[in-house]
Image (cartoon, grey):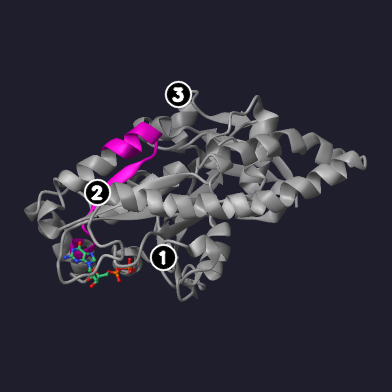
């Protein structure tokens, strides 16, 4: 599965957000037997109104949304990269996630201590990022000399990557994240992504605001949003406390509660969708009378590999993907209508599956 790590300083609302995510959005235990993988890891369903629309058209008996994993990663404090707090454990957890979600405290509450002594989301974001940069610096300071040595000894892999690695070290030594390294081409972009660094992972920000600002945001979250915009990172405003209250309401009362505070969907749905987008994921659908199901693949995945997400046999014996685009499926009233209108395609091995495609795989057993 794809994983988003939730990080931030202590007392910013990480656990409140994580627990609300799980109680509201937890994937159905019946479909996914391993929902709670570890105490701090949970799978949530990705809300997607397209799935409901498709199921209605096809008369599907069951809906199975796709899912995303969230990890509550505690232990980040100033000095974590040097082993302060639970520094090492923290770093190993963060290495395992695909994207990082920074929770920034944007609520004032004298009862709740701030480890840095005051509420300041921009400073907090810097403290957190600096720890990740320092961890990358330490790792590169070991790896660069070792790789230089190998390159001199004639190791091809080392020779190919050392130039870039030295440039990354320079960027990180200047206190900047590794993702700020200028890359020359696609090959270098791949090499950079494969260096197992923390500051190449895509990031998003979640501003945790006071209850009264759940729909509007506040002055602190506005500052954080401006910072995120400058970096080109997604930013979502939520009130973790409100979300946790919503998560405890009976299903039928949630919509009214949201409307009463001026929201059209939960903050959690926005967090999940932003995380999904940040991962560069796209969704395809399989639709039939038994079930309508959403599946997740990285953008650019070819049809056989997309088939392999459903079953390895589908990939091995792949022949063709019967394909109808989402809007064609909806506008033409399903597969039969799409066929009549000439909007039904047979795609082969080189077809990159598009977001929203409704697919049916033909394969040899
Ligand atoms: P973590 O250490 O980042 O995981 O933070 P927690 O989720 O444990 O929250 C720390 C404290 O802040 C708890 O007492 C929460 O109830 C409280 N808290 C979290 N979000 C909010 C909020 O939006 N407003 C207020 N007033 N308190 C909050």
- Which mark is drawn over residue 27? 1
Q: With respect to residue 130, does 330 lie above or below?
A: above
User: Looking at the picture, how far across and down is residue 342, in whole percent?
Assistant: 50, 23
Q: State the residue at coordinates (48%, 69%).
A: 84
Nearer-N-terminus badge (3/2) = 2
User: Looking at the picture, how far across and down is residue 119, in whole percent?
Assistant: 22, 56
Range of magenta residues: 226-242
Question: Which residue position is annotated with label 3?
Answer: 341
40 or 353, which is in the foreground? 40
Q: Is residue 247 left or right of residue 328?
A: left
Q: Nearer the viewer, mark 3 or mark 2?
A: 2
Question: Which residue position is annotated with label 2?
Answer: 237
Rounded to the nearest whole Å, what is the CA distance between mark 3 and mark 2?
43 Å
Q: Is residue 186 left or right of residue 34?
A: right
Rounded to the nearest whole Å, what is the CA distance between mark 1 and mark 2?
23 Å
Badge 1: few (under 14), some or many (20 or more) residues near its Cα, within 10 Å?
many
Q: Secondary structure at mark 2?
A: strand
352 or 274, which is in the foreground? 274
Examine the structure image and report whether residue 227 is included in the region drawn in magenta.
Answer: yes
């Amino acid at each position: 599965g794809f994983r988003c790590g939730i990080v931030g300083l202590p007392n910013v609302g990480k656990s409140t957000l994580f627990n609300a995510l799980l109680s509201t959005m937890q994937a159905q235990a019946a479909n996914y037997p391993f929902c709670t993988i570890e105490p701090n890891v949970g799978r949530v369903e990705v809300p997607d109104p397209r799935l409901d629309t498709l199921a209605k058209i096809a008369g599907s008996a069951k809906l199975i949304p796709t899912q995303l994993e969230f990890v509550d990663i505690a232990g980040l404090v100033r000095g974590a990269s040097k082993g302060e707090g639970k520094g090492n454990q923290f770093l190993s957890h963060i290495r395992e996630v695909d994207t990082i979600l920074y929770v920034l405290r944007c609520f004032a509450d004298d009862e709740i201590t701030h480890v840095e002594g005051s509420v300041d989301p921009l400073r907090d974001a810097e403290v957190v990022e600096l720890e990740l940069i320092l961890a990358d610096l330490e790792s590169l300071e070991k790896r660069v000399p070792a790789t230089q040595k190998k390159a001199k000894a004639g190791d091809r892999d080392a020779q190919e990557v050392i130039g870039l690695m030295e440039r990354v070290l320079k960027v990180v030594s200047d206190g900047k994240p590794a993702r700020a390294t200028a890359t020359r081409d696609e090959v270098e972009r791949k090499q950079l992504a494969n260096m197992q660094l923390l500051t190449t992972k895509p990031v998003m920000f979640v501003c945790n605001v006071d209850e009264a600002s759940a729909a509007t945001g506040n002055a602190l979250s506005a500052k954080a949003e401006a910072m995120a915009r400058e970096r080109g990172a997604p930013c979502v405003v939520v009130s973790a406390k409100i979300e946790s209250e919503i998560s405890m309401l009976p299903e039928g009362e949630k919509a009214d509660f949201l409307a009463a505070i001026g929201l059209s969907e939960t903050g959690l749905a926005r967090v999940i969708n932003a995380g999904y987008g940040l991962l560069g994921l796209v969704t395809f659908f399989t639709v039939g009378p038994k079930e309508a199901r959403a599946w997740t693949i990285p953008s650019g995945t070819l049809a056989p590999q997309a088939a392999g997400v459903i079953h390895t046999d589908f990939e091995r014996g792949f022949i063709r993907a019967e394909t109808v685009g989402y809007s064609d499926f909806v506008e033409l009233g399903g597969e039969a209508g799409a066929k009549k209108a000439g909007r039904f395609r047979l795609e082969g091995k080189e077809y990159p599956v598009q977001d929203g495609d409704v697919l049916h795989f033909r394969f040899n057993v």
